[in-house]
Amino acid sequence: NLIALKRIDEKSTKLQQQGNYLEALQCMEQGLVLRQHLFGVDSEQVWSACKVVGEMCNLLAMTYLQQEDFQLALELLKKAEILTEKDAAGRAVTCNN
């Protein structure tokens, strides 16, 4: 429900503020799934969330690439590629990374 979604979003924001980006990403992914159930797969809420989650995947992928964790970086880039299906600019960033 909407209360659970709000809690997930608040937790994600708090984790990001604390620098716990990977854990924040997990919350963001939970929020995305919940949005799909609440609003429908092709809703504006879902695609807006996809854009934000895709951006986080790209950010984390570059961080893990710098740390030479290539497997995790690749996994995050693959997620970003899926999430940016309807976001041309986001897809370009993902491909550039």
Image (cartoon, rainbow, N blue to C red):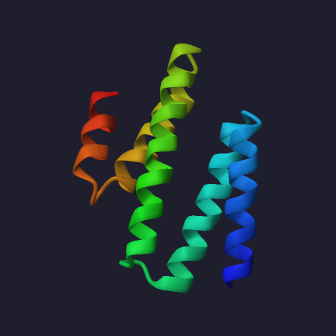
Instruction: Identify the residue shown where x is 33% and y is 37%.
Output: 94
Horizontal relation, residue 25 to residue 42: left or right: right
- Residue 66, x across and y down, in percent: 53, 14
- Residue 45, x across and y down, in percent: 45, 73
Instruction: Identify the residue shown where x is 48% and y is 62%.
Output: 49
Total numbered badges shown on the rendered structure: 0
Q: Is residue 20 above or below residue 41?
A: above
**The C terminus - image quarter:** top left
Q: Is residue 93 above or below residue 42?
A: above
**Quarter occupied by residue 20:** top right
Instruction: Identify the residue shown where x is 57% and y is 70%.
Output: 33
- Residue 55, x across and y down, in percent: 45, 43
**Quarter occupied by residue 96:** top left
| Relative depth, front residue between 75 and 58 | 58
Instruction: Identify the residue shown where x is 44% and y is 59%.
Output: 50
Horizontal relation, residue 4 to residue 68: left or right: right
Horizontal relation, residue 16 to residue 86: left or right: right
| Relative depth, front residue between 69 and 50 | 50
Q: Is residue 28 above or below residue 66?
A: below
**The N terminus - image quarter:** bottom right
**Quarter occupied by residue 8:** bottom right
